[in-house]
């Protein structure tokens, strides 16, 4: 093991000492996470609202293209944006469904 005392620029006062009984090696004590259920539901609501607005925008852009008010590039961008947000919403829905199924299989 190398002793850092002989290295230039080493200061014994700069060495951090363990604090408290909960100290284990280099790990800080874990604090329990607080979860606000309303934050999760508002996040889901916002995500699905954004998805709905992206799909409506893509539909409106398609109608505008039929009437000659939008270019094909604008339609393609709107449809791709709607597709990406829809894929994200479907992925979240699938994760929520699988979590629910996993919880329902737990023994009480």
Image: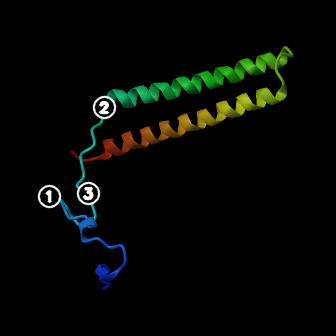
Q: Position of residue 78 (x, y in %)?
A: 71, 28
Q: Quadrant of the image for the N terminus? A: bottom left
- Residue at 65% x, 20% y: name it: 56
Residue furthest right in the image: 68
Disc 1 to disc 2, how far (Cα)?
Answer: 29 Å
- Residue at 48% x, 36% y: name it: 93
Disc 2 to disc 3, how far (Cα)?
Answer: 24 Å
The circle on residue 20 is 1
Q: Position of residue 88 (x, y in %)?
A: 56, 37
The residue carrying mark 2 is 36
The residue carrying mark 3 is 28
Q: Quadrant of the image for the C terminus? A: top left
Q: Earlier in the sequence, mark 1 or mark 2?
A: 1
Is the residue marked by circle 3 packed among few (<14), some (14-19), or many (20+) residues within 10 Å? Answer: few
User: Does 17 appear above or below 34?
Assistant: below
Q: Secondary structure at mark 2?
A: loop
């Amino acid at each position: 093991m190398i002793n850092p005392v002989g290295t230039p620029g080493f200061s014994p006062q700069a060495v951090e000492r363990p604090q408290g009984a909960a100290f284990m090696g280099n790990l800080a004590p874990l604090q329990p996470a607080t979860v606000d259920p309303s934050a999760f539901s508002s996040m889901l609501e916002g995500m699905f609202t954004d998805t709905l607005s992206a799909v409506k925008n893509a539909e409106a852009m398609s109608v505008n293209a039929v009437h000659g008010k939008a270019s094909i590039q604008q339609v393609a961008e709107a449809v791709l944006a709607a597709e990406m947000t829809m894929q994200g919403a479907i992925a979240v829905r699938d994760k929520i469904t699988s979590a629910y199924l996993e919880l329902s299989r737990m023994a009480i």
